[in-house]
Each structure stands twice: as C-alpha cells, then as structure tokens.
Image: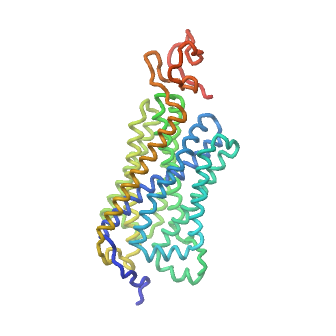
Amino acid sequence: MTPMLPFFGTLPLPAPVWLLKALLLLTFIVHLLFMNLMAGGNLLAAVFAFKGKPRHLDAARGLVRIMPYATAFAIVFGVAPLLFLQVLYGPLFYTSAILIGTPFLLSIPVIMLAYALMYLAAYRWDGLKRSRPWLPLLNFLLLGYVGFIMTSLSTLMLDPDRFKNKYLAHPGGWQLNMAEPTLIPRFLHMMVGAIAVAGLYIAIRGARRLHLEPEQGRWQYRSGATWFAGATLVNMAIGGWWFLALPKEQMMTLMGGNLLASISFGAALLAALLALCGALLGINSVKPGPYLWGTAAALVAVFAGMAVMRDAIRDAALRPDYVVQALPVGSQWGAIGLFVLLLAAGAWVCRWLLKQQKIAGAERHGKPPAPGLTDSGIRRLGPMGSRPGMPAATDSGAHRLPPTSSGPHRLVDE
C-alpha cells in the first residue's frame, strides 16, 4: 500500500520534538493574546465610534492608539510558531499552502494594508470625523480574512488523504477547505474570543483610570467586563459546536485518549468559568482591579489549555500517516540557544517600546499633578489646570462644588 505521505526530509529536526513543541506552544500563546487584542480591538473601536458619545469615543481612541503596537507584537510573536510549525509539519503545511495558493499569498498584502490603516487611525483619529467607525471596521474585516485563510490552512493540514484529489480537481491554487465541518466553528471561536480579549483590555484600562476619571473609568470597566462576559458565554456555545464537529477519534483524545490533552481540556473549562465569574464580580465592584487581573490570569490559562488541546488533536488526526515523534533528530543547540537569545531580546524591545509609548503619551497630554490635601483627585484636569505652578487666584472655581452641595460629586458626560 502506497502511503499518503512518502518519507520527507533528509535533514533531521534541530532539537528534540518535546522542546520544539514547547517553544511552538509558548510563542503561539503569546501570539494569540496580541492577535485577539488586535482583531477584537478594531471591532469594539468601530462599535464605540458608531455610538458616538464622548465616553464611547474616548474608549475607541484608546483602542485605536494601541493597535499598531498590538499588531507589531502579534507579527513578531507569530513568526516563531509559524517556523516551528513548518519544522515539525513541513510536508503538511507546505502542501496545504500550495493548495490554497493565491488566497494564502494574498494574506500578506492584506495584513500590510491593515497595518498601515491602523497607523492612519491611530494618528489621525480626531481628524477622521465621519470615517472614524469605518476605518477600524475595515481593519477588522481584513484581519478576519487573514484569520479565515489561516484557519482553512490549519484544518486542511489535518486531512492529507484529500491532498491529491483536491489538487487534481483544482490545480490553480484557489482552494479553501469549505468542506471541513470544523472550519466555521473553529474560525468563529477565534473571532468571538478576540472580542472577549478586547473587552477585558478595555475593562482593565477603565479600572486603572478610576482614581483620576471616576465616571469614565467606571463606565469603561463595566462596559469592557460586559463585553468580555457576553463574548465568553457565546464562545462557550461555539466551543461546544466545535467539539461536537470533531471526528470521533479526535474527540476521544480530549475525553481520556490523551492524558495531557484531557487534563488541559478540563483545566481550560474551569479557567473559562473562573474568568467569567471574575468579570461578573468585577462589573459591580467598587475595586474591580483584583477581579479583572484574576480574570486575565484565568484567560491566559484558557489559551494555554486550548493550545495543548489543539496540538493533541493535530497529532491524533495525522496518526498513523504522519507521526512527528518518529522524525529523525539531530540537535543543533547553538541554533536553539541563538533563537532563545533573540526571543528574549525581542521581548525586551517590545517592553521598551511600550514604556516609551507611555512616556510619550504622558508628555503629549501633560501629567496631572498629584492630589493635595484639599483636592479629591476626582475631577479631570484640563490643559489650563494641568500647568505646574498655576496660581490659585486664576482658578475659576468652575470645577468646585456649590456651597450647598453635599455628598460625592458625579461628573457629567461632556
């Protein structure tokens, strides 16, 4: 019997399979976090811009300004898992890419266009006026195209029995994997998850603004936590759809067929429930920070569990035609050490960029002074009020409470 995949690769793997898989999963989890923030952030920025109220526009502005950084980090940390995937599953990846062909190659200029438009939105947001909501919406659609193509490629990799017939039927490289029953739920699971990640980011930013802008901060963390909780509930249903669409062999991998995958499956479900509870508790909490940061930690655990499950399902789907553990190994520790060094350097550069962006933003808008003994710190300082050394005599008193007012002073939307 002729094997569906003849022996490929005279070059051995540069490191043990377990190490390559560990690096694949680690870099893929980091990529997923930034990728979800990038896609979901553009969609929520568009939704807020369509609503058009000052508080919505303020939240949308914060989202579009972080998008160029999130995109850069998603690309940087997306290259590494893609390389590890090609090392471990080269025959499957390249064959699937050839079958999809043109749509796959088009994803490169599409992501470049989206990246450029994100810079346009970030630095020209206040001048865009009517086109404000449409630009992030267009970015979301462009990113959705890239996500759909990569999902189609990832699912086609798992079915090498169809490679030959698909090529003979359409050798021009214009194929997608639309016949795959898991394609749509897998894609929707990714996109709805992106909304949840962006919602949590908005909530955390809102919680951090409470001490200076209580009204905006309170609305923002409640809105973001609501988006996160709603998207998480929807994604649980989509995840059930995805699970039921799996072939029986792959489904049983998560139900006891693979110990690590089964533990990851249970841990991911538990972490998702904890994340949902944390977001719901944070919505009406006076101090939502601990709840939201706990939700973020649980969300990272969900991503880690799903990455392990995804890897186990891939190996179960390819067995016995392609067993990655049976590939020859010729360790090249110098190359692996260089990769780890460059990865650490890249992470440090990303952290430095975020720090510089924060400093530049503070210098551009002016740092508010620390509240004094007679200043509650609740009001939002304007350009005049933020000047150091402003004489007290020039204070118009417009922000002060009237003499007969009592109780906490709530700010009114501008």
Q: Is residue 338 above or below residue 131?
A: below
Quadrant of the drawing holding the N terminus? bottom left
Quarter holding residue 290? top left
Q: Position of residue 232 (x, y in %)?
A: 48, 49
Q: Determine if residue 292 is in view.
A: yes
Drawn side of residue 77 relative to residue 116, left or right: left
Q: Nearer the viewer, residue 114 or 406?
A: 114
Q: Is residue 99 left or right of residue 160?
A: right
Q: Nearer the viewer, residue 300 or 253?
A: 300
Q: How many marks?
A: 0
Question: Quarter of the image holding residue 147?
Answer: bottom right
What's the residue at 46%, 28% (across, down)? Answer: 211
The answer to whether any part of residue 234 appears in the image is no
Specify how the rendered protein is coloured. rainbow
Give the residue furthest to the bottom.
1
The answer to which quarter of the image holds residue 50 is top right
Q: Residue at x 54, y 50 (%)?
A: 68
Looking at the image, the residue that sits furthest to the front is 389
Q: Residue 29: where, in percent of width, then height?
A: 41, 56
Q: Is residue 106 above or below residue 330?
A: above
**Foreground residue, 408 or 87?**
87
Residue 67: % across, % down: 54, 49
Percent from the top left, x then y, of residue 227?
Answer: 52, 44
Residue farthest to the top, as pictured: 403
The residue at the point 41 percent across, 73 percent down is 89
User: Quick one: quadrant of the C terminus?
Assistant: top right
The residue nearer to you, when weighing 120 against 7, is 120
Give above or below for 227 relative to 262.
above
Taking the view exactly as shown, the residue that stands out farthest to the right is 130
